[in-house]
Image (cartoon, grey):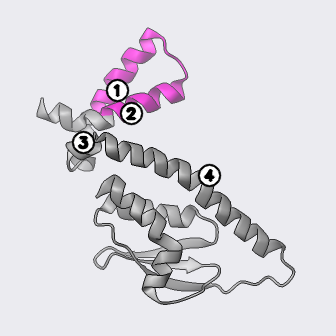
Amino acid sequence: MRRLLRALPIILFSFLLYLLYSGSIRIYDIVTGIVVSIIIGIVMAPIVIENWRKSLDLYRFFYLIKYIIVYFFIYEVKSHLNVIRIGLSPSMSIRPGIVRVPIRSRSGYALTLVSLSITNTPGTIVIDVDEGKNVLYVNWIYVTTVKPEEVYREVAENFDANAQKIFD
């Protein structure tokens, strides 16, 4: 029973993903989805899930949904508009550089979310991760400072704060 509880988050996610991609809610598809999801969940849970209670916490789930909405509709739009402005300006005012960004998140999942969020945001890309020191090295299109705390505030603070609420 404990093994099944540990696998439950992966089972639910796999089943919902299966239904979404199959596009069908016939009995055959539902039964197949349940069987495949249980197998995937039991096999993957020991590898992916550290604490199953954390993964079923609704508080964390709502923060994840909020983060997805805010990220795609605010952070991404602002960054795209900024890169468009830079690209269309006649003077091409860029100051590219590689900066060191300290991250406060502790878990590997949170560090991955922050790294992917920075990389997916136009104008920044993570080029290296130092997990031992919790530091990201980011290629930034318009470097305004090289002080790690100020860079953190400008590049990663919003992403890191949300990742901590979701994963730590």
For the residue labelled by badge 2, is the local secondary structure a helix, a strand or a loop? helix
Marks 4 and 1, the one that precedes in the sequence: 1
Distance, label 1 to label 2, CA atoms, is: 8 Å
Residue 29 in percent (x, y) is at: 45, 16
Mark 1, mark 3: which one is toward the viewer? Answer: 3
- Please identify the residue farthest to the left as the structure is shown: 1
Residue at point 49%, 81% (across, down) = 151
Label 4: how many Cα within 10 Å (few below 14, some 14–19, many 20+): few
Marks 2 and 3, the one that precedes in the sequence: 2
Residue at point 28%, 77% (across, down) = 132
Distance, label 1 to label 3, CA atoms, is: 14 Å
At label 1, the amino acid type is Val
Distance, label 2 to label 3, CA atoms, is: 12 Å
| In the image, residue 90 above or below residue 35 | below
Disc on res. 73: 4
At label 2, the amino acid type is Ser
Marks 1 and 3, the one that precedes in the sequence: 1
- The picture quadrant where one finds residue 23 is top right
Residue underneath mark 2: 14
Locate residue 146 relative to residue 35 in the image: left or right.
right
Disc on res. 45: 3
Q: Are marks 1 and 2 in contact (CB under 8 Å)?
A: yes
- The picture quadrant where one finds residue 130 is bottom left
Marks 1 and 2, the one that precedes in the sequence: 2
Residue 125 in percent (x, y) is at: 55, 71
Disc on res. 36: 1
